Image: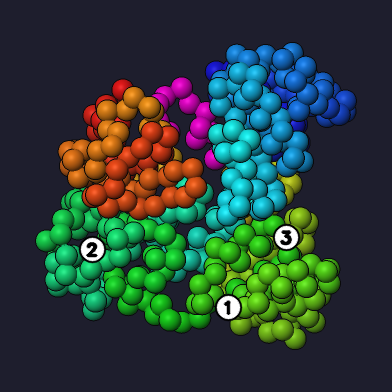
Amino acid sequence: MKIIIAGAGDVGFFLCQVLSEDGHAVTMIEEQDAIADEAESSLDARVIRGNGASARCLEKAGVSSCDFFIAMTAHDQLNIVACSIARKLGAKYTIARVHDLIFSDNKRVNFQEYFHIDTLINPEALTAIELAKHVRNPERMAVEDFARGQIELQEIVTSPSAKALGKPLKEIRLPSSLKIGYLVRGETLAVPTADTVLEAGDKITVIGTPELLLANRKLFTNEDSSSTIRVVLNGATETAISVIRRLSNYRFKIRVIEPDLKKCKDIAEAFPNVTVINGSATSLRLLEEEQIGSADYFISCTKDDEENVMTCLQAKKLGVKYVELVINKPDYEQVLQNISGFLDIRAAVSPRKVTVNEIKKYITNKDFIAIGELKGGTVEFIEFKIPENSPCLSKKLRDLKLPPACIVAAIVDELKAKVPNADDEIKAGDRIIVILEKDKRREVAQMFLP
């Protein structure tokens, strides 16, 4: 496919490298000569020197015939304007990288819709999803996120004295926005019905909003959902703010360590329930005075990789149960991934990698996107975008006659994502996430696509 990338920073450069290695015809637009020179010498891509928001530059790059235009500069406004102009000039699909969380806030203005951009990608928010999901799932079972974390799937093993055991699911009265997807009992995988009775040791996949899943875990497991989980965040960065939002439940007691007094005040005003400590986590004395060793999680989210590594090691030595960190420098990624087990690091997340992995989900010539899998790859998650001439339009889910072991896990419209019930209808433009056995892919695709 023909792909144009504006911006050859760390993420744009890596994205260009990955996509060109995948066999795509990639054109890179970069304004700074030194970076453009490096891209020309290192990448198997055409490089154009210029401003990615310039209509003349975009026309020179061939935007009118490109399959994907991806704006990856460090400037949100430039990325948004570039994608809007690219769409006007004929780009089939546009993706803009944004850092500021205001562009994801649709309460007053839907920026994505207003500027006619197909997808907004926030690296910090994606990084936070990866960091927070380990904290949110104490049983360490599989966790998958759909629709940028709006919908979550968790695997849970039922406890012997769980409240949901011994009676049909229809008597449990689960919230309408929460459903059990699959049940694995022994070697058998099945989709439970209203009359299914759960047994101890069953492995179930539960789908819902993160808040609902957290509130209803006690139905299936004896894990004490009322116990407090203490989390310490190092650095009041955009990633840390996104982690705080992902852990907004009362169960999580969060402290933030930040040397910049203004950032401390901003965090304290935005999140009254968060304790803010003005100081540096590199100070052993500060960590000891604040009894950081008693925390369950220490997550270092600063822009300085050396500080992230050293503060995590210090926190671990003081007694923190689990440590996680952000890796910003490409040169450190492989090293830290290799030694994270030796250093007892729970998760080391690269914003560059999670962003590129997210974008790659959309770079396909198929009518759907494969976004994940379960059970060794035999069960997969597929995302369909419903076209104007879809055969399923205005039909209720109960009338679609889906094949066995096929579940519509989420419907995502322009504003939000939801876990649907049997009476929900599918509309043109919706994105639907379906969980199915891989050999049913073609049969299901024919139900949603013309």
Classify mark 3: residues with Cα within 10 Å, few (<14), some (14-19) or many (20+): some
Q: Look at mark 2 in the image and give the residue it sits on.
A: 202
Q: Specify the quadrant of the image occupied by residue 93.
A: top right
Q: Callout 3: helix, strand or loop?
A: loop
Queried whether the magenta region covers residue 228, the answer comes back as: no
Mark closer to the observer (2, 1) = 1
User: Residue at (34%, 24%) from the top-left corner?
Assistant: 389
Q: Which mark is residue 237?
A: 3
Q: Position of residue 130 (x, y in %)?
A: 55, 55
Amino acid type of the residue tagged 1 in the rendering: Lys
* Quarter of the figure that contains the N terminus: top right
User: Residue at (50%, 77%) from the top-left corner?
Assistant: 251
Q: Look at mark 1 in the image and give the residue it sits on.
A: 253
Amino acid type of the residue tagged 3 in the rendering: Thr
Q: Decide which of tag 3 and tag 2 comes sooner along the chain.
A: 2
- Is 299 placed above or below 2 here? below
* Quarter of the figure that contains the C terminus: top left
- Is 37 placed above or below 328 here? above
Amino acid type of the residue tagged 2 in the rendering: Asp
Q: Specify the quadrant of the image occupied by residue 306.
A: bottom right
Decide if residue 303 is on the left or right side of residue 203. Answer: right
Q: Which residues are magenta?
A: 356-370
Q: Position of residue 117 (x, y in %)?
A: 59, 34
Q: CA distance from mark 3 to mark 1?
A: 18 Å
- Is 383 placed above or below 168 here? above
Q: Position of residue 424 (x, y in %)?
A: 29, 47
